[in-house]
Image (spheres, helix red, strand yellow):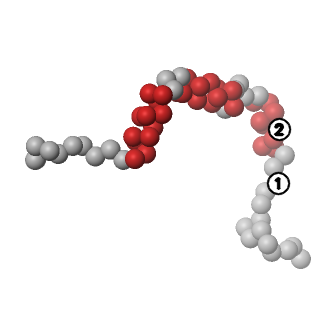
Amino acid sequence: MPLFWKPYRSDVTQFIDELKTRKPTLEAEQRAGRARLWDRAQDREASADWQDAKVPQQPYVYQTEK
């Protein structure tokens, strides 16, 4: 390995690292946003009702029944 060799860092990696140094609370904000949108308690009864109400799909959806 030559003496002047540096490990490769892509432009995207450099941008993300720079963004994290400029805004250190970024990851905490992302986690809070995820918790607000996705990490919720599930209503199992409503989910079961939703599954029961599904109509089975035909193998070929564009074919009309005769």
Q: Position of residue 64 (x, y in %)?
A: 85, 74
Residue position for label 1: 55
Q: Can you name the residue that lies furthest to the left here?
A: 2
Question: Is disc 2 placed on a helix, strand or loop?
Answer: helix
Label 1 amino acid? Val
- Return the disc, 1 or 2, that comes first in the chain's sequence: 2
Give neighbour class at mark 2: few <14, some 14-19, many 20+ (Cα, 10 Å): few
The residue positioned 81% from the left and 41% from the top of the image is: 50
Report the quarter where the C terminus lies.
bottom right
Res. 44 in view? yes
The residue positioned 45% from the left and 37% from the top of the image is: 16
Q: Is residue 42 found left or right of 31 in the rendered image? A: right
Quadrant of the image occupied by residue 43: top right
Res. 39 in view? no
- The answer to the question of whether label 1 and label 2 lie on touching residues, with beta carbons closer than 8 A, is no
Label 2 amino acid? Asp
The residue positioned 44% from the left and 40% from the top of the image is: 15
Question: Is disc 1 placed on a helix, strand or loop?
Answer: loop
Q: Is residue 64 found left or right of 13 in the rendered image? A: right
Image height of 34 relative to 8, above or below: above
Q: Can you name the residue that lies furthest to the right here?
A: 66
Residue position for label 2: 49
Q: Position of residue 62 (x, y in %)?
A: 79, 72
Q: How far apart are marks 1 and 2 (CA)?
A: 12 Å
Image height of 45 relative to 52, above or below: above
Image height of 28 relative to 1, above or below: above
